[in-house]
Amino acid sequence: MSFLTGGRNRCCISAQRPMISRKLRLLVLLPLILLMLFVLGQTGRMGWADLQYSAISTELSFWRRQSYQPQPPRVDKVTQQLALARRLDANHPDYLQAAAELLRWQARWATDPQLSRDYLRHSVELQWQALIARPGHRQDWSRYLREKARQSDFDARWQRSRQQIQMLDRSP
């Protein structure tokens, strides 16, 4: 059998390797493996949040219809899903926009006028945060202007929004 191994006994050669090289390899590979697991975990969490956002966005698109009003358990579920997604990334523009849309919907169906105004005010604030995070989306700036105009709130943000739309219209 020695002719298969070139006249050497492989079993004895591997036993003669120093044990330090195995420990050194393990010491080098372990942090890399842990880093890879961490990155995969973060990617999985963000992927899960994006899937949640997709479901939330689809559900909210039905809520925009004039006559549709979801059952309270469905509203609670969407609110919880959105809160979970925002916990993972509180400043994600899509999640902020969805939260603003949810608040606009709640304002539309609120029976108390003061509560409705509070919902709208908070909705506009979340929408502003989403705009700042994603300044190149013209349709979001237009939606923001409409919401501010509905509230007759023509402040500095409203002016900046108009300027941003004009700048986006001029850009190629």
Image (cartoon, rainbow, N blue to C red):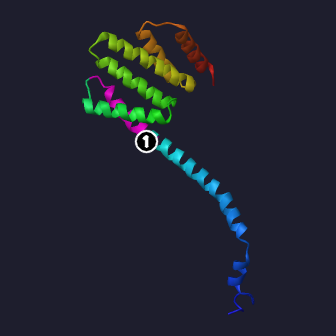
Q: In which image quadrant can residue 65 be found?
A: top left
Magenta span covers which residues?
A: 50-66
User: Which residue lies at the image location 37% right of the left edge and 17% below the top edge?
Assistant: 119
The residue lying toward the viewer, choosing from 85 and 25, is 25
Tell me: residue 4, above or below residue 29. below
Residue 43's spot in the image, x, y percent? 53, 45
Dot 1 alpha-carbon crowd within 10 angstroms: few under 14, some 14 to 19, many 20 or more? few
User: Which residue lies at the image location 46% right of the left edge and 7% below the top edge?
Assistant: 153
Q: Secondary structure at mark 1?
A: helix
Residue 116 located left or right of residue 166: left
**Magenta-drawn stretch contains 54:** yes
- Disc 1 residue type (three-letter): Leu
Tell me: residue 44, above or below residue 106. below
The residue lying toward the viewer, choosing from 138 and 36, is 36
Location of the C terminus by quadrant is: top right
**Magenta-drawn stretch contains 156:** no
User: Which residue lies at the image location 47% right of the left edge and 21% below the top edge?
Assistant: 127
Tell me: residue 117, above or below residue 72. above
> Dot 1 corresponds to which residue?
51
Residue 25's spot in the image, x, y percent? 69, 63
Q: Main secondary structure of the magenta part?
A: helix
